[in-house]
Amino acid sequence: MGKKTKKPGKGKEKTERKTARAEEKKARRETKKLSPEDDIDAILLSIQKEEAKKKDVQVDDNVPAPSPRSNCSLTVNPLKETELILYGGEFYNGNKTFVYGDLFRYDVEKLEWKLVSSPNSPPPRSAHQAVAWKNYVYIFGGEFTSPNQERFHHYKDFWMLDLKTNQWEQLNLKGCPSPRSGHRMVLYKHKIILFGGFYDTLREVRYYNDLFVFDLDQFKWQEIKPKPAAMWPTARSGFQLFVYQDDIFLYGGYSKEVSSDKSNSEKGIVHSDMWSLDPKSWEWNKVKKSGMPPGPRAGFSMCVHKRRALLFGGVVDIEVEVDVMMSLFLNELYGFQLDTNRWYPLELRKEKSTKDKLKKIEQNCPDDVDKKINPACATREETEESDDEENSIDYISKNIASNMSIDDGETLTKSEGKPKESSAKLDLQSSLPEVVKPCGRINACMAVGRDTLYIYGGMMEIKDQEITLDDLYSLNLSKLDEWKCIIPASESEWVEASDDDEENEDDDEDESDSDGSTDEDEDDEEEEEEEAQNASVQVVDAVALIKGVGKNLRRKERRSRIEQIRASLGLSDSQRTPLPGESLRDFYRRTNMYWQMAAHEHTQHTGKELRKDGFDLAEARYRELKPILDELALLEAEQKAEEAEAPETSAKKRGKKKTRN
């Protein structure tokens, strides 16, 4: 049966009831007897005893790559720019959380990992910060989570790793910041600048906006307090901090605030403001947004290359239907010009290999083949400048759509019974190289060494699973031509929680709520099941769906998947996405300012050269998305047809969507 229509005010009452139950559960967790897996003090003491047994530094060469993890640190070795230092991180497999304290050194030229084991190493942690200076890496803070995620321990310890000897040393100094994680640290000249973070007390989460400076020459901490009436960023964690000349920039972040109504519920805030700190006067000033800044997001990563800061990834919650939210994991790359304070999208330049392939296709085309019939034989100049440009691009679109392979390998053709014309057409899609790029993610590591950007690990979601990544990508920042996958992602482990685990976790709740169990509680369970099927999917799922996998999905699931595919591919951004039936010519006319701005950051060209550069970027995006858009149009048409056949059933199922409070 379909879910009954909600009474006015029922949602609010439900929210208050759930909030009260959550608070009761939190209080019970604090008072109940700790299980061995929740006793963090005992776990850390055991780890400390094991560390004490180590006598010498041990370096294992050519070891397997690190296991999947997020919230780790990745630092370029100041003594050797072709070496990356990876430390710590965490992994959640659906049942337990694992926190790491291992140290890896990766040679990007030899493609080899080294595992370093040293006496007196820091205890395992994630969400810490690392800064490299001279031949040292400095690490502060972070957190340790019990396997069952019932307890958290925030660190306030400060460590120094000698990259020449692989020896750790703990720096016990007065005036250091309080325990925290999610903070940020950067190096400014001979000083470490630390700001913000959070501390989870179980009863509440405290967010910080305090500022500390550590002098690397004098080995002293100093807290910088705001002057009366001075401008100052609000408390937050998960933001990004970066340095350019005598300015320290802060961007974004996340925090929670308690609502002012009676429910006292917490509301998450995604910050998108930018600040600059003057390290001479220690005064903050707001930075006005200019150019084309990224939209608000959480969990993104940033680093600096020459005169620009680079932003990658993050997550956004979007409303796909009324009161139905979906998490969208992003893989966009943005630049922030540090000398002009201007944002712009960083689109990859059109690959030379693609142009070379198109030239070869043109050379190999028979003279008697009509270029309108075979659009792959038409040159870019003809496409851009001829009077029949629109017709040519329309033929390209039709050719791409007519050569899409579906599940069983059959080919869709719009001109059945015309084998001669079909044989003359080339498969344009197969003639172009596959686009390689990191998938959307949060809490990934970013570092720049020798004009190369490296992105490692992080986390994303597929359906109801958290996928922790262990892939490594690189991008030449001088060329900006293509992503290279150095280490592909391995298959992520996921353990479904057993019935026994769920019963133990909710045992207290069952006892307290057994008398007042109602049909509404059953509806809650149904809604939670529905929510699990409305989580985000990435390009892999898009390809699987487009090729026919899951063609027998229920209407509701298919509708949700279609929306998720559109979102995960960035199809909601009209500046970067062709409209239905839009030709390449019209697409470029409508979005030329976007593409010319992106191209200008690559080439610094102006006039006709800049228009051609912008057209190259728009064309690459058009060809990348056109097959998927065409197939999505078919799926959406099928979906609408099915919903038209049974509108009442569809309406009932839509009413059962999970509502977030």
Image: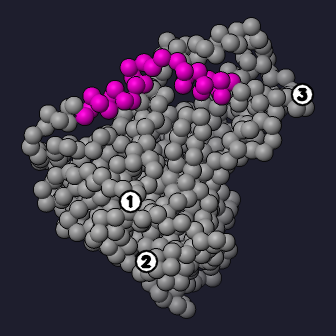
Dominant SS of magenta comes to helix
Q: CA distance from mark 2 to mark 3?
A: 56 Å
- Image quadrant in which you'd find residue 571: bottom right
Q: Is residue 63 visible?
A: no
Mark nearest the camera among 2 and 3 is: 2
The residue labelled by disc 1 is: 446
Considering only vertical position in the picture, is 332 above or below 151? Answer: below
Which residue is the extreme one toward the bottom?
Answer: 607
The residue labelled by disc 3 is: 7
The amino acid type found where label 1 is placed reads Met
Where residue 12 appears, as percent x and y from the top left, is: 82, 33
Dots 3, 1 in contact, CB < 8 A: no
Q: Which mark is residue 244?
A: 2
Which residue is the extreme one toward the front?
Answer: 174
Q: Classify mark 3: helix, strand or loop.
A: loop
Mark nearest the camera among 2 and 1 is: 2
Query: Would residue 368 be counted in the magenta stretch?
Result: no
| Front-most of residues 49 and 637 | 49
- Density class for disc 2 (Cα within 10 Å; few <14, some 14-19, many ≥20) is some
Query: In the shown orientation, is residue 507 left or right of residue 77?
Result: right
Report the quarter where the C terminus lies. Answer: top right
